Amino acid sequence: MTFDYDLFVIGGGSGGVRAARIAASQYGARVALAEESRMGGTCVIRGCVPKKLMIFAATAPLMAQEMQGYGWQSAATGDFDWPGFRTKLHAELDRLEAVYTSGQQNAGVDLFMQRATIADHHTVELADGTLKTAKHILIAVGGRPVRPDIPGAEHGLISDDLFLLDRLPRRALLIGGGFIACEFATILNGLGVQTVQAYRGDAVLRGFDRQGRDLATAQLRDIGVDLRLGISPTRLDQEGDQTVVTFDDGSTDRFDAVFFATGRAPYTKELGLENTEVRLQKNGAIAVDEWSQSSVPSIFAVGDVTDRVNLTPVAIREGHSYADTVFGAKPRKVNHDIVASAVYMRPFELASVGLTEEQAKARGDVDVFATTFRPMRSGFAGSKERMMMKLLVDPDTDKVLGCHIFGPEAGEMIQLAAIPITMGATKADFDATIAVHPTASEELVTMRQPSEQYRGQGGDD
Ligand code: NDP
């Protein structure tokens, strides 16, 4: 059977565009891609990129305050020009979208800027009714924010909405304690919005190293976020311009804007999967094997729609590996075990690679090398903020199992620490590395004595 294309990609986000470009430009495959919204997907249009630019904007008051400790006379930054910033932000997103579009066109990918659904194992139906056949279909449609199932949830905003606001709210509520809630709380607070964050747990960022979570929780409060732990909203009511929120502790409060940052779900609804034998997981994610292949041999899936490690660079790697494997005859799997990530809070970020202390202890014996200290720059300015560096080491093999950093630009630091850790470096390799002085990151190669030698249950201490 002849097909219109070798590959039809559904979704123009990080994973989809990488797979399409590599398959077409490096391996000569005939490729089409459909995108219902904007090229670039969540990360570029309504995620990582605009978020990080807003984090930069939100840093100004903290920096100005810190510089007072260096002799500058005023901490005043003036008023924040949201409309001016938003115009510039969207111009940048337009530019990036154009870069992604031309990247596909230059690679020879046929673009269809409309929704596509799956008609059968080799056929895609476009919103205008056109049918396209393909030897392979790659589903790279990502995820979408979810709102909790509570009365009035429709009155709450989602993360996409932050970048489109006509004006900044005077008082805002963020619901959740994950990546988005903590980063958005940092942004809104930094831009001068009275920010309340409500999280059902006892410390934000579940899944991260506990010590880092405690420091991040304390920092949110230190910068002025009204962080309320152990509570969840039970209903939202709209009263004029204000949203009244009722919480499960019986309290109510009113806000100009309420944002749900309560997770994201795979975007598989109404994708035509009922016309296929593609197996889904309970949460709607596409079940795939280590080659990103679904239960249907001609249909693969990469990125958040598979709910493996939901981060942009992982989706990119999955898309690239898929193209190498299927079109380049270079079989490549993705190792999801060691993936670094960072939460872009201010003034300090929380960044992590490998096992947390809790995971390492659950696994067995571990030597913990941990230190907290006041870094030079903010310490001199009078800040009490403490930075954290932690290495977790297997005492039998001396291998570094995990690294956790809470500090300025921790995201930049963890990227570099992730290289030796991915390579399987030992603590002795770290120790053999001569420090760069004076830096905060030199602690990574100067921690000599373990702060704890955990020997598990029944082991010697
Ligand atoms: P997360 O899964 O990180 O956090 C969701 C938060 O919402 C958790 O604190 C969770 O609580 C809470 N929650 C979930 N359901 C409810 C509910 N019904 N009521 C109250 N609270 C609830 O999701 P995010 O939305 O923050 O981010 C989505 C994904 O985007 C992340 O998983 C991450 O992969 C990615 N991302 C990455 C970033 C980065 O790399 N810097 C930045 C932003 C997003 P609990 O912990 O108790 O379950």
Image: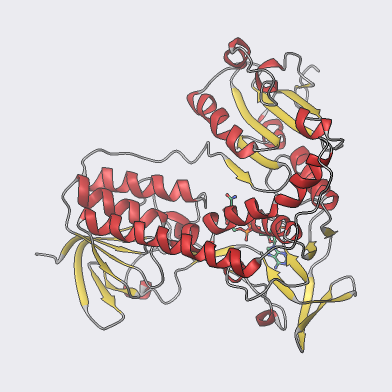
- Horizontally, residue 327 falls left or right of residue 303, namely left
Please say if 101 is above or below 237: above
Identify the image quadrant of residue 450. Answer: top right
Colouring = secondary structure
User: Residue 220, percent across and down?
Assistant: 79, 51
Pick out the residue farthest to the right.
250
Q: Nearer the viewer, residue 178 or 66?
A: 66
Which residue shows up at 17% across the image and 63% down it? Answer: 5
User: Residue 147, percent across and down?
Assistant: 64, 72
Pick out the residue farthest to the front.
73
Any part of residue 96 in sight: yes
User: Residue 406, percent across and down?
Assistant: 72, 37
- Ligand 1 falls in quadrant: bottom right
- Horizontally, residue 340 falls left or right of residue 11, namely right
Which residue shows up at 62% across the image and 73% down it? Answer: 165
Q: Quadrant of the N terminus?
A: bottom left
Pick out the residue farthest to the bottom.
240
Please say if 16 is above or below 329: below
User: Residue 35, percent across and down?
Assistant: 35, 69
Any part of residue 142 in sight: no
Q: Nearer the viewer, residue 297 or 342?
A: 342
Q: Nearer the viewer, residue 414 or 3?
A: 414
